[in-house]
Image: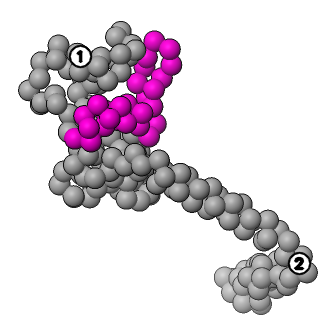
Amino acid sequence: MLEGILSISGQSGLYKLITQAKNGIIVESFDTQKRMPVYSNAKVSALEDIAIFTSAEEVPLKDVFKKIYTVENKKATSVGKKATNDEIKEYFEDILPEYDKDRVYVSDMKKVITWYNVLLEKGLMNFDEKAEEAKTEEVAKEEKTTEAKPKAAKAAPKTAAKPVAKVKADAKPKPSKATSPKTIQRKSN
């Protein structure tokens, strides 16, 4: 669900990973649908790797989104953009009562709420367990086929002929008379 969705420090909104580039990545903005390069020195966070600190353990962002989705009955958050810090803290406490009040800031809570609303609007909030299981099985099948391919390549016979380029590289060229050092010295005298 959150695969390939990124947050870029210094940039507002969320981005979709398009491809790897030579010096970074190419992303597409969810807001403007415009593509742009993001260089390797930028701080990029994948949403699937983000977790919220709690008193017991870290809760993955996906689980926080799932709780919001359940509490809001599959709708956008009831907290508006102009909500006060106290309203946001109260809302977040309803969603995740055990969050670490010392390490989770209001700015973090605002991001989580905003991201949830953006992903919901784009139709990316799919918590259907059957769909998730099917996706997990598909990924497992792809990994098995990827693992099987290198093993098949190793089983190939070792009696294959050397590539032509390698044979030529191994052969030592014979110097011609025109390029030998003796010929060059004679001409200069």
Q: Which mark is residue 157?
A: 2
Rendering quarter of residue 147? bottom right
Tell me: residue 169, above or below residue 25. Answer: below
Disc sitting over residue 181 in the figure: none
Q: Residues within 10 Å of mark 2 (few under 14, many from 20)?
A: few
Residue 104 image offset from top left, x and y in percent: 34, 17
Q: Which residues are magenta?
A: 48-75
Along the line of sight, the residue nearer the viewer: 151 or 138: 138
Q: Which residue is mark 1?
A: 89
The location of residue 94, given as percent across then percent down, is: 29, 19
**Residue at the spot x=77%, y=82% of the render?**
163
Q: Residue at x 12, y 30 (%)?
A: 80
Q: Which residue reaches farthest left?
A: 82
**Label 2 secondary element:** loop
Q: What amino acid type should be assigned to the residue bearing mark 2?
A: Pro
Q: Is residue 154 magenta?
A: no
Q: Amino acid at mark 1?
A: Lys
